Image (cartoon, coloured by chain):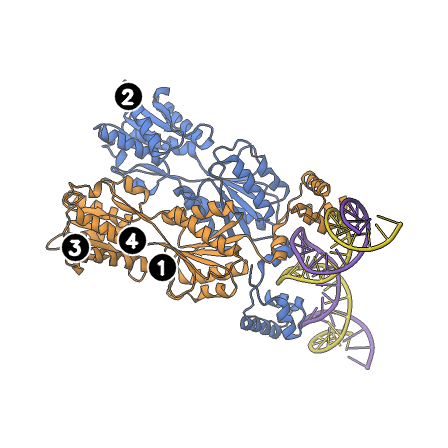
Chain colours: A blue, B orange, C yellow, D purple
DNA sequence: ATTAAAAAAGCAAACGTTTGCGTAAAATTT
DNA sequence: AAATTTTACGCAAACGTTTGCTTTTTTAAT
């Protein structure tokens, strides 16, 4: 911090006042005379005084820094979450510092250490895919620094969470496929050790069951990294089945797009032969042809909610609420990839 | 910063050593005995000591914080830049704090103030679209905090920059359109008060001139916000001309995609009737049909380069170099939207 | 055995704020 | 006019490190 040239002491000297008076004046403390306060502000302005937040943080024993841990920043979902976090943090006078775990457990642990030494006021995190054990987050419980997880959360840890109801969303999207007449519905699933993807599979199963449709394990294909390529691979596999599906629910939009491209190349019509639905409402879902039916995961909203929860906990006088879970409403967005003449509207 | 329970003082008391010895031991200072150093580390480990970075920052009068100002985080280009910045910053022991200007001048100014009070070690910024006057950045020159701009840079300010050669890239992409046989090439341009977009227009003009093609102002359409919608609007306008273009160079991929959709709806073939090229190599450019020829703007590389430059300047012993400009190589990526039987390869 | 040099550790003052407590002066009440 | 309250400000100790300088102890050289 090269800078902070003029300090509170300089102001004090110039005005023949004590540093405490200056400090209080700059905070508009009532015990300082109105005229004095005005004069202090004026001089501060003149001399180009800027408070030293670092010193203030040290003395107050708290920072205004919110630490955010994301798997990767350049994934659309996370960048939208961060954007939401930053927006409300800024308005509430907090700063945001960001770390990428790269889905590595080791790095996630290292980051928590950095956050601790940096004395962040609170933490917002999405667990790395590799993470099984969350004990490195436990320290923040003792340290009384609030923690809120989003999207990929830990169940073994007492902490606040903001998530979407993946089960319900998957159920609704599958039900939608059924409503438009699909009877052999496949699922391109995500990594099943991650709860959100397991929930999506369960929601899919529940919808089938509710409609007296068989669950056929051959129709579920696991896409490890949820990429276009994995989507294509799974689609190719599904098309090789003796009896191919007439609808596919994909665990995210990328795999859905991979599937769409394979299906189109196979000269099958979407949605007539096979209807496709994705998950997340990535920008490309409006670009792909046909445009993609999907679930809006409301990423920015998730970020805002997480930030609001966290800040409330940081500033909480009333320490009653230990943790809180918010489930965000999701929206099914119907587009051309499932727009058939509906059997049931 | 609720936390930092055990301090250096506690260690000192326990070991009957002075705090200075502890501090030095923890930094492996040579003037502390090997055994002592080992013991101090061991005890620190045992008691769960964590350094208080805030206190350290105050005393050392510098932080390890890099402030990043972006227009918006949820724009793919910027999230990739940030990702690059974070990656090298993390490796070099720096933290990254992020602010969104929302392309608002007022907010950009407010953010610079926050960065100053937070004593950041250096700043990486992409100017807000609204910004004309950069004097709010000038203070960092006096304060000796290094500043590097990326993408949208200021020419009126002595500061380091990392940019791509927009003129050259535009020239090459236009030349490519000419090479495949286009003779009436339109340009969907960005806001001309921003230098990168002005440069792209100039590059386009230069390519025409170099090939003895007329520059026709009617073939240039300005898309204010570079959105799909603006791209569509411009395309519609171009298709209403008495003699429509046979190629369009768009100032970014979004407008290109908007244009593609309008052109396809008009039952014109891409690239046969009209060839299209975009700019930035957004992920969707591989998804859209036809896949889009574009310029790879190497966003992550830009972030990494900016971070490396900044950190070098922060740690610079040799203060000779006041500012530096790095121009990144760009790549023309040819895809189906310009894949004709080439006249000139 | 004395002196010189090197090694190991301590003292105390910073860094720039914030804040509990104390006190003088001014205003108010008896 | 004395006693009391209120108002406005000062003192000084924190917050947890780092660091220039000094002091003590050990080792090496004479």
Residue highlighted by disc 4: B226
State yes or no: discs 3 and 2 in contact (Cβ < 8 Å). no
Question: Which labelled disc corresponds to residue B129?
Answer: 1
Question: Which labelled disc corresponds to residue B229?
Answer: none
User: Which is nearer the N-term, disc 3 or disc 1?
Assistant: 1
Lateral position of residue B40 relative to residue A241, left or right: right
Name the subunit of mark 1.
B
Label 1 to label 4: alpha-carbon separation: 12 Å
Front position in the image: B298 or A136: B298
Residue highlighted by disc 3: B211
Q: Position of residue B319 (x, y in %)?
A: 51, 61
Residue at disc 4, secondary structure:
loop
Name the subunit of mark 2.
A
Q: Are marks 4 and 3 on the same chain?
A: yes
Lateral position of residue A342 relative to residue B130, left or right: left
Q: Position of residue B7 (x, y in %)?
A: 69, 47
Residue highlighted by disc 2: A240
Residue A312 visible? The answer is yes
């Amino acid at each position: 911090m090269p800078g902070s040239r003029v300090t509170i002491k300089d102001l004090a000297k110039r005005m023949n006042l004590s540093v405490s008076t200056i400090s209080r004046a700059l905070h508009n403390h009532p015990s300082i005379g109105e005229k004095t306060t005005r004069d202090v502000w004026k001089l501060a302005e003149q001399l180009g005084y800027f408070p030293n937040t670092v010193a203030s943080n040290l003395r107050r024993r708290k920072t205004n820094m919110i630490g955010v841990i994301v798997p990767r920043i350049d994934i659309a979902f996370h960048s939208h979450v961060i954007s939401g976090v930053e927006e409300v943090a800024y308005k509430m006078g907090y700063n945001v510092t960001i770390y990428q775990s790269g889905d590595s457990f080791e790095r996630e642990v290292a980051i928590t250490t950095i956050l601790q030494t940096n004395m962040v006021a609170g933490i917002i995190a999405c667990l790395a895919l590799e993470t099984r054990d969350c004990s490195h987050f436990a320290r923040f419980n003792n340290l009384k620094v609030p923690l809120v997880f989003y999207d990929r959360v830990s169940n073994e840890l007492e902490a606040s969470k903001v998530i979407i109801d993946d089960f319900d969303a998957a159920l609704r999207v599958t039900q939608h496929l059924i409503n438009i007449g699909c009877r052999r519905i496949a699922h391109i699933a995500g990594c099943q050790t991650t709860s959100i993807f397991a929930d999506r599979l369960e929601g899919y199963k529940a919808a089938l069951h509710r409609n007296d449709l068989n669950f056929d394990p051959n129709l579920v294909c696991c896409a490890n990294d949820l990429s276009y390529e994995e989507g294509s691979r799974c689609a190719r596999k599904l098309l090789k089945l003796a009896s191919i599906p007439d609808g596919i629910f994909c665990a995210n939009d990328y795999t859905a797009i991979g599937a769409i491209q394979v299906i189109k190349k196979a000269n099958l019509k979407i949605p007539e032969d096979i209807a496709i639905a994705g998950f997340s409402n990535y920008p490309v879902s409006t670009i792909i042809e046909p445009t993609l039916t999907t679930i809006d995961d409301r990423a920015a909203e998730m970020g805002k909610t997480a930030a609001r929860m966290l800040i409330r906990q940081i500033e909480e006088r009333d320490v009653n609420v230990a943790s809180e879970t918010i489930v965000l409403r999701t929206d099914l967005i119907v587009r051309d990839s499932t727009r058939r003449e509906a059997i049931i509207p």
